[in-house]
Amino acid sequence: MLRKLLIGTALGSGLAFAAHAQDVKEVEMLHWWTSGGEAAALNVLKEDLAKQGFAWKDVPVAGGGGDAAMTALKAMVAAGNYPTASQMLGYTVLDYAAAGVMGDLTETAVKEGWDKSVPAALQKFSVYDGKWVAAPVNVHSVNWLWINKAVMDKIGGTEPKTFDDFIALLDKAKAAGVIPLALGGQNWQEATMFDSVVLSTGGPEFYKKAFNDLDEESLKSDTMKKSFDNLAKLVTYVDPNFSGRDWNLATAMVIKGDALVQVMGDWAKGEFNAAKKAPGTDFLCYRFPGTDGSVVYNSDMFGMFDVPEDRKAAQVALATATLSKSFQSAFNVVKGSVPARTDVPDTDFDACGKKGMADLKAANEGGTLFGSLAQGYGAPPAVANAYKDVVSKFVHGQIKTSDEAVTQLVNAIEDAK
Amino acid sequence: MTTVATQIKLTPEHNARPGASMRSRLQDALPKIVLAPSFAITVVFVYGFILWTVYLSFTNSKTFPSYAITGPRAYQRLWRWTFESDPPSSWYTSITNMGIFGFLYISICLALGLFLAILLDQKIRGEGVLRPIYLYPMALSFIVTGVAWKWFLDPGLGLEQTLHQWGWTSFHFDWIKNKDFVIYTVVIAGVWQASGFIMAMFLAGLRGIDGEIMKAAQIDGATTFQLYRRIVIPLLRPVFLSAFIVLAHLAIKSYDLVVALTSGGPGGSAWLPSNFMYEYTFKRNEMAVGSASAVIMLMTITAIIVPYLYSELRERPR
C-alpha cells in the first residue's frame, strides 16, 4: 500500500532504487550532528563499528533542530531509498512507523534486555505496536542553566533556587555590564526555554497537564499567563542582536564570558567540552530555578528503517553497538547527555553528567520525567510547531500581551490537533 | 515540356514507393519525435504534478500523501488565516509580505535597471568594464546573496558595527532583526542581485532602437527628457514585458533568499508563501494545507500573468 502510495512522490524526486548484490558491510546514517561537540560524539560510534568491519556512510544535514534533515529523510523514504538508520525525534519515529517503513528490532531488543533498562517514558517512542523500531541513543534534559563561572565569581552570584533569585542574578550581571542571558532567537530555542519556564512557574503536575496532555483548562489558565509574563521578563535580559542566532553561537557567548548564562538542553555541555572547559572550574550547571527534581527530556533516537535483507546485518550491528553499555557511556560523556539505559555506571561522567543521571533515575521512578513540547516529545509535530510559533511571536512582539498569547496558544493547538 | 510532363506523371508513383514514403513520413514525424520526450516530461512533471497537488489539497494528508478526499478543510483554514492580522497568522504574514516584496522588488528593479541602462547608453568609455560589474550579481545563487547580505546587515557584524568603529556611533540600522522591517532587507538583497540583469535587458533594447527616429525627434526640437519619455520608453515596451515576467517569477520563487538572509525572520515575520508552503508540507506534516497554499499561489500568479500576457501579446502583430 505504502509503496503504491509513494510511487508518485518517488517519480517526483527522480531517484532510482539502488540495487544491492550481496551483504553490504555499510551503515548509512542520516543525522544533523554537525557542530563540534556533536560530531565528536558521533565519532565514537563510527569507530566502534569500524572495529567490527562496518563502513560508515555519513549523510549529515546541518541545522540545529533537525528540520532540514527531516525533509531530506522524507525525500529519501518517499523515493524508497531508506537509510540504515536516521537520527529522529519523538513523534517522528511514530509517524514513520505508522507509515510502515520502519524495521523490526524486537529480536535484538529481547536478546539485549532493552525493555528492562530503557526508561518507560522513552519506550513510548521507540516501540511501536509492540515492535522495537528505534534505538534510543541518549536522554537529554532541557531544564538546565549553563553559567560561566568566571563571570559568576566576578559579579558574586550564587546558585539561583527560585525564579526570583534568577531574575536577581540576571540583574547583577546587567549591572556589571555583561550580557545577562545568551539566547538564540530561533523559535525552537525560545520554546525550549519556555518549557523550563512553565515547569518552574506551574510545577510538574501543571507541566504534564498542559504540555503532554494538552489540557485546555491548563493551557488557558492564569498559571500559563504567568509563565508568559515570566518569559517576557527573561527576554528583557538578552542582547538586541539575538534574533536568528544559532544555539551554539549563544553557547559560545557564555564560553567566552560575553554572557553569563544560557538556558539550553544539556547538548550545550558538548560545546563546553569541545572548548576544553571543565565543569565546576570553568562553567556551572544548575537545574533551571524551581525545576529541581523534574526532568524535561528529549531523546535522540536512531530510527531503524525496513532495509533490504542484505543490509539487515549492518543494521543489527549498529543497533547493538548503540545500546551497548560501553558506547552509551563513552558517547554520552562526549555529547553531554546521559545514557538512555539506567544501568550504565556513571564513573566516567563529570559532575554535571552524574547529576543528570541521578536526576533521570529519580524522575523515572518518581513519575516526573516529562517530554519536552518544544523538542517534539510532548505532542505531535503539528502541535509542537504551532506552540513554537506562538512562543516566538510572543518573544518578538507580534503577540503583545500574555492574555493574547494564551488565547493564541489554545487556538493554535486546537487548530493543529 | 516533356520533362515536366514526366515529372508530373511520376509524382504519384514516386509517392507510392514504400521506401520513399517511409522516409517522408519519418521526415514529417521527426519534429514530433524529437519534441515528444520533453513534451511528455513537461506534461507529467509540471501539469501532472499541478493536478496531483490540487488533489492532495482536498485530502487530509499529513506526513505522507493520503488518497481519501475529505473536502476543502485546508482551504477553509487558509481563508480564516487570511484575515487574522492581529496577531498575524503565518499565512497573513506570508501573503502581505508577498505583496510588499513583489511590488517593491519588481518596480525598483525595473526603474533602477532602466536608469542604469540609460546612463550606460550614453556612449561612455569603459562600458565594457562597467556592464559586467552590474551583471555579475545575477551569477550568484540566492543562497550566496542571502548569506553575504545577512552578514553585511547584521548590526553586530556588518555595516552598523563597522561605522561604529569608524566613529559614527549614532548610526543605527537593525532592519534585519526587526520584525516590521525585515522584509525590506529581502527587497534590498533581491534588487541588488537582479537589477543588473534587468539593466542588461534594457541596454539590449536601447541598442535596438533605430537611431534615425532619435535624430528625427531631436531635429523636431524634443528635449532629452521628452525623447526618452515619448519615444524611447514606449519603444521599450516588449523589454518591459520580458523583464516583468523574469522578475515576477524570481519574486515568487525567492524562498531561498528569505531562508539564507533571515532564516524566516523574528517570529516568522519574513515568510513568503513559498516558505509557508515548505514549512507546512515538510516540517509540520500538514501536507494538505501546504498543497492548498501552493494552489492558491498558482491561482494568484495565473490571475496576474494571464491577463497581462493576453493584452500584451494580442497587440503585437500590428
Image (cartoon, rainbow, N blue to C red):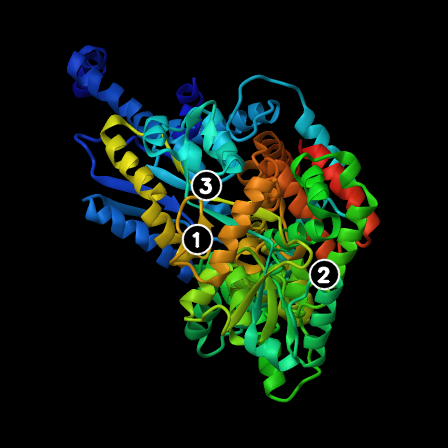
Residue marked by disc 2: A162
In this view, the mark in front (3 or 1): 3
Asked whether the viewer can see residue A397, the reply is yes
Going from the N terminus, do you reach mark 1 or mark 2 first?
A: 1
Q: Chain of mark 3?
A: A
Amino acid type assigned to the residue bearing label 1 in the image = Ala
Going from the N terminus, do you reach mark 2 or mark 3 first?
A: 3
Residue marked by disc 3: A88
Residue marked by disc 1: A62
Q: Residues within 10 Å of mark 1 (few under 14, many from 20)?
A: some
Q: Secondary structure at mark 1?
A: loop
Q: CA gap, disc 1 to disc 2?
A: 36 Å
In this view, the mark in front (2 or 3): 2
Asked whether the viewer can see residue A375, the reply is no
Quarter of the image with the N terminus of chain B is: top left
**In this view of the protein, which residue sits in the foreground, B270 or A100?**
A100
